[in-house]
Image: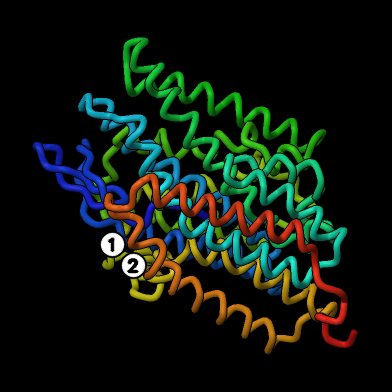
Amino acid sequence: MEDIAHIRSRSADGRSTEINGHAATTTRSSDYRVDIDGLRAIAILSVILYHFKVPGFAGGFVGVDVFFVISGFLIGGHVASSLEANRFSLLGFYARRIRRIFPALFCTLALTVVAASVILFPPDLVRQLPIAAWVPVFAANLPIAKTLGGYSGSFAQASPLLHLWSLAVEEQFYLLFPLAMLAIARLGGNRNIPALAALAALSFTASVVLARIEPVRSFYLLPGRVWELLLGVLLAIAAAQPPRSRRVRDTLALFGLVLIGFAILAFDEATPFPSEFALAPCGGAALILYARCDRRSLVGRLLVNPVSRQLGLWSYSLYLLHWPLLTLTRYYFDAPLSTGMLCLVLAASIGLAALSWRFIEQPFRRPAPSFPIVWGLLAATAAVLLTGAARGPAPRLHRLGA
């Protein structure tokens, strides 16, 4: 899942915040938020364990909802503080989002289409190409909702591009949220919490209703998910200081972790989602962000240790890579994967994610990569997509036992 890797902040006395490599003033005092990396590690691990069908993690899909709250918190805080300082640039914001999202996404998409063209049967490959074609315009969730059906269906579970629905939701939010904030600012306030809260309440109501009558659309599309992102936004722009008491902060963080853990362990594919059930993981993530854990707390020790931090830093590439590797391997063998094979797939996912973070994500986070490079990535990806569509998949002999 796409997310800002880190946030550095200093106090509001003229010093600055660094979000994803660029400066922004802030109204709250904080240091490097290692706990956010740790929270992202929990989110990605829950998603992976759910996808790998590890017993006890039937609700691991809620990791995506945790990612949404984190994204809203970091993006919302940056946009609001930049508007308050009268230095927000819409083009600059979109350029940073492109540098952050596109390189790893397009590299993964190109590799996935090439592998799918070799492994998948023609009807299955044809169903994937429309999804791939909608990725560059931030709308992969539309064909996914229309053609793949429910998330747990056999057809959806065989789609190597299924997981891109969540990136599409975030990208659509990134397109619309700055425009909404600019409109609010022109109406007399760049931190109009009531307006955002009303929008979040409307989205939440829609998610509760649609989860019962249109569960597929509610799950995949933006309207039922906006409130999750706005929950993070509202937490950020409210700039509420965490309680002074360490015991209270630790209690809040622990309760937030319990809420996320409860959702992971208690929810399953029969749970109407997002709906009101998403309040547990989203509220838990919000409580942890609000509590601002450090190494001296119980939850802080879980979140800020080096392993959690590194997994959090790799989480975007790991989210992109693990699902295509899993689905294509499962499709190739045409049989349930053994525990040993699943471990190999997981190890390969982590290794490739580490390489992607180091050699693709990190270089593009700097301002140096320009739009020609981005357009070059787009052109290369388009060429791969067209090549895959033209050649079609290889015959069944590519699968063992054929």
Q: Is residue 301 above or below residue 338?
A: above
Q: Is residue 90 above or below residue 117?
A: above
Q: Secondary structure at mark 2?
A: loop
Q: Residue drawn 48% across and 51% down? A: 102
- In terms of depth relative to the viewer, which is nearer, 84 or 385? 385
Instruction: Give the mark count.
Output: 2
Q: Which mark is residue 294?
A: 1
Residue 66 in sight in this render: yes
Residue 228 horizontal/vertical position (percent): 54, 39
Q: Secondary structure at mark 1?
A: loop
Q: Which mark is residue 304?
A: 2
Residue 394 horizontal/vertical position (percent): 81, 72
| Mark 1 residue type | Asp
Q: Residue drawn 32% across and 36% down? A: 92
Q: Earlier in the sequence, mark 2 or mark 1?
A: 1
Residue 354 horizontal/vertical position (percent): 44, 73
Confirm or deny contact between disc 2 and disc 1 (CB under 8 A): yes
Q: How is the image coloured?
A: rainbow
